Image (cartoon, rainbow, N blue to C red):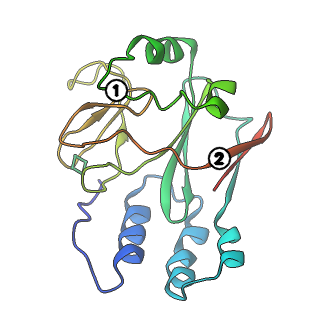
Amino acid sequence: TATNVENKTEDGESRRDFLLLATSAVGAAGVAGAIWPFVDSMNPAADVLALSTTEVDISQIEEGQSVTVVWRGKPVFVRHRNAEEIEQAAKDDSASMVDVQKDADRVQKPEWLILIGVCTHLGCVPLGQKPGDPRGDFGGWFCPCHGSHYDTSGRIRKGPAPLNLAVPPYEFLDDEHVKIG
Ligand code: FES
């Protein structure tokens, strides 16, 4: 289960990032994530920050599936959306919901959704909603800490979280690889 990470320690951001890593469900990139607090504590120059990009092979992610990778110590959700999810994103375009897919780069590949998996309330890691979930059928992510809901585009549909899930910088290197950061 995720941990409320409101507690701040002397090294602030680094500590928070480490806790987020520890609470994410996926440990595959744990080594890279684990060294980040040490790199960060040395206040690295820009060339060192280049190390903080993460390349993801998306060729094995099937429609309707997500993977979680670690970028700068934070979980990032990479989701291969199905046609229904893409359609849903277009339908729910109400004024209160900023569509994170509107940016030109992202519209190029609407089947891919890439989001920072950190709740915009107090920083817990939202969990993917499963069909038949008693919380309702909204298909996106819910935050186990205080109950915020995000839809299948990462848009807030129930607080207390104030904002949509953030979109990290990313670039498709080719049809099978995306670079985050
Ligand atoms: Fe409070 Fe997510 S951290 S709802």
Tell me the residue at 38%/51% (across/down): 118
Q: Quadrant of residue 175?
A: top right
Spot occupied by residue 7 in the image (x, y as percentages of width and height): 22, 72
Residue 167 visible in image: yes
| Label 1 sits on residue | 97
Quadrant (top left, top right, bottom left, bottom right) of the C terminus: bottom right
127 left or right of 40 in image: left
Disc 1 residue type (three-letter): Met
Label 1 beta carbon less than 8 Å to ligand 1: no
Spot occupied by residue 108 in the image (x, y as percentages of width and height): 69, 26
Tell me the residue at 49%/86% (across/down): 41
Q: Of residues 42 and 103, which is closer to you in this image?
A: 103
From this view, report whether residue 71 is shown above or below residue 35: above
Disc 2 residue type (three-letter): Tyr
Which label was assigned to residue 170? 2
* Numbered circles on residues, count: 2
Q: Secondary structure at mark 2?
A: strand
Q: Which mark's residue is nearer the viewer, 2 or 1?
A: 1
Q: Which of the two labelled residues, at mark 2 and mark 1, occupies the earlier sequence position?
A: 1
Tell me the residue at 71%/44% (across/down): 171
Q: Secondary structure at mark 1?
A: loop
